[in-house]
Amino acid sequence: MSKFKERLFQIIYHSDTTAGKWFDLILIFSILTSVLVVMLDSVDSLSQEYDQTFHVLEWFFTILFTIEYFFRLYCIRNPVRYAYSFFGIVDLVSILPSYLGLFIPGGQYIMVVRSLRILRIFRILKLTHYVGEADLLLKSIIGARFKVLVFLFFMLTVVTIFGSFMYLIEGPQNGFTSIPVGVYWAVVTVTTVGYGDISPHTPAGQAVASLMVIIGYSIIAIPTGIFTAELSKQIRKDILSIGPECQVCGHRNQERNANYCTSCGAELEHTLVE
């Protein structure tokens, strides 16, 4: 690796130098400002009045992040692996919409994806240390998926039955114009959201609504219990298998003897785990 590439790598991927700290600060400011521009541009009154300003700012940040993205690919040991890593994809997706908008009709509608730039702050602030914890939660959700699906099918059956009852009890004159409307009401009621756009007027309907609320409070903890049990199981597995963590992208599922990250290709720093 040339001295220029090594110096560039230190500035971009590490913040333990003065240049690296300034790079991170400038990048954080740029990301927050670009996200703010995207948010303000979605307000019709501001978009019409400052359309040209927003357009210039958007292209300024797009070009800035494009240069940064290619510098990241240039100075890293394995650019292909970095490009396919989580943050590599986030970096790419955050700049693509502006370019696609030039060639695809209606491309302005996909520019909302630019708000994903806010995710890049996780890496800059070294919060990728917690990506392993996020992986743990994801594994727990995947592990509990079948139990949760059974629960969801059960709930679908419950809201369909109660929604049909409410259609028969209340009828169109009270807002329950069809069974799907009754099912919608049942979903809103059993989840204890209660929008209030449709409500029962008859004593029988109010009794059914009361029963639905009680059922909602009774079963709302079921998926939480399922997920908690699976999370405890994954934590026990995770304690038994700790590999070296990548200091660049935060990826943890490495082989113990690996020298380079399987996600972004950066060199791994091996530490002894007690």
Image (spheres, rainbow, N blue to C red):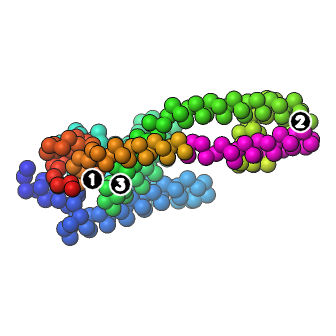
Tell me, yes or no, if residue 158 can be seen here: yes
Q: What residue is pinned by disc 1?
A: 68
Q: Which numbered disc covers residue 130?
A: 3
Mark 3: amino acid: Tyr
Asked if the residues shown at circle 3 and circle 2 are in contact, with their CB atoms under 8 angstroms apart, the answer is no
Residue 190: assigned label = none
Give the residues in magenta: 197-224
Q: Label 1 amino acid?
A: Glu
Sequence-wise, the earlier of marks 3 and 2 is 3
| Helix, strand or loop at mark 3 | helix
56 vs 83: above or below: below
Q: Where does label 2 land, which residue?
A: 170
Task: Give the residue furthest to the bottom.
Answer: 18
Give whichever of 82, 114 is nearer the camera. 82
Local secondary structure at mark 1: helix
248 relative to 174, above or below? below
Q: Residue at x 34, y 43 (%)?
A: 237
C-alpha gap between disc 3 and disc 1: 24 Å
